[in-house]
Image: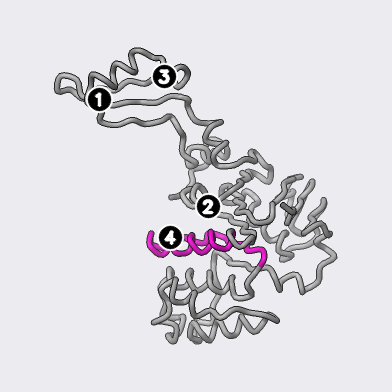
Amino acid sequence: MAKVFQIEDLYFRYPKGVGDVVKGISFSVEEGSIFGLLGPSGAGKSTTQRLLTKLLSGFRGSIRYFGKDLNEYNKSFYEKVGIGFEMPVHFNKLTARENLDYFGNLYQNHIDYETLLTRVGLREAANRPVGEYSKGMKVRLNFIRALLNDPQVLFLDEPTAGLDPNNAKVVKDIIREYREKGRTIFITTHLMGDVEQLCDQVVFINNGLITETSTVRDLKLKYGRKEIKIEYWSQNDLKSKVYSLEGLGENEDFLSSLKQNQIETIHSGETTLEDIFIKLTGVEGHE
């Protein structure tokens, strides 16, 4: 797979800032993947996203986009890049369709958005002024707007924040479909459930520094406990035991418990991404 982004020794300081917000980070993003940049508020992830989308300049280090220096790209860069901001800005006096028509016409090529309006549940409200929309409706409209130019690379900041489970599932399904087309999706979010369900690779950033780069599966293996816990009924009492996974198939006590007792539950020692987030950043995420 080609590298969509190759970031090496990236530093950035805001003009009036005292110190660097991004402090020498390096990572790469593969084409056709969903990449998660995770970290607490103020960690530097939003700044990094703005640098990759050319909304900020003046960085030190190297950012290469499909092998070419990002600084060498002009405004045509945005023809195949979609961006969904966490705090969407819409024209509130215009309808959803009018908003989409306006933003779609900023590109040389754009999609027919009617199918997406239906999928995210906005078709019937598409001729209403956006100022009448709820927060969740505006988030869904913002998501469609990010897809208007049929982007090869899609940047999404908190794409399901404020959505109910049904609408969040629709958005995540569309994101997966984009990956299946060979597109690349770059996500920043605090919702660890979304990360577990979507991301192929994740980078944790804290205080401008990368603290971990891995896949979700490998992170769980690294930080989880290699054990299982069983709950079982014995003489009308609910009891529990913990067994190491090492040699489990030959553990006579474990095998005896399975054979002789009514098993209520079996749990692995797999940790959650929420726990890993706290361990790596020292800050609780938000589900």
Q: In the image, is residue 225 above or below residue 58?
A: above
Q: The magenta stretch spans which residues?
A: 152-179
Residue at the spot of label 2: 198
Residue 232 bears which disc, if any?
1
Q: Distance between the residues labelled 4 and 2?
A: 11 Å
What amino acid type is highlighted by mark number 3? Gly
Q: CB under 8 Å between callouts 3 and 2?
A: no
Q: What element carries label 4?
A: helix
1 or 3: mark nearer the eye: 3
Q: Distance between the residues labelled 1 and 3?
A: 18 Å
Image spot of residue 62 (x, y percent):
82, 52
Q: Which is nearer the N-term, disc 1 or disc 3?
A: 1
Q: Give the class, few, some or many, for how many residues have Cα within 10 Å of label 2's Cα (few <14, many ≥20).
A: many
What amino acid type is highlighted by mark number 4? Lys
Q: Distance between the residues labelled 3 and 4?
A: 38 Å
Residue at the spot of label 4: 169
3 or 2: mark nearer the eye: 3
Q: Is mark 3 on a helix, strand or loop?
A: helix
Q: What element carries label 1?
A: strand
Residue at the spot of label 3: 249
Report the front residue among 236 and 249.
249
Does 162 appear in magenta? Answer: yes
Q: Which is nearer the N-term, disc 2 or disc 1?
A: 2
Image spot of residue 71 (x, y percent):
83, 63
What amino acid type is highlighted by mark number 1? Tyr
Side (left or right) of 223 relative to 1 = left
Q: How far apart are marks 1 and 4 (CA)?
A: 35 Å
Residue 224 bears which disc, if any?
none
What amino acid type is highlighted by mark number 2? Leu
Image spot of residue 263 (x, y percent):
25, 27
Q: Give the class, few, some or many, for how many residues have Cα within 10 Å of label 4's Cα (few <14, many ≥20).
A: some
Q: Which is nearer the N-term, disc 3 or disc 4?
A: 4
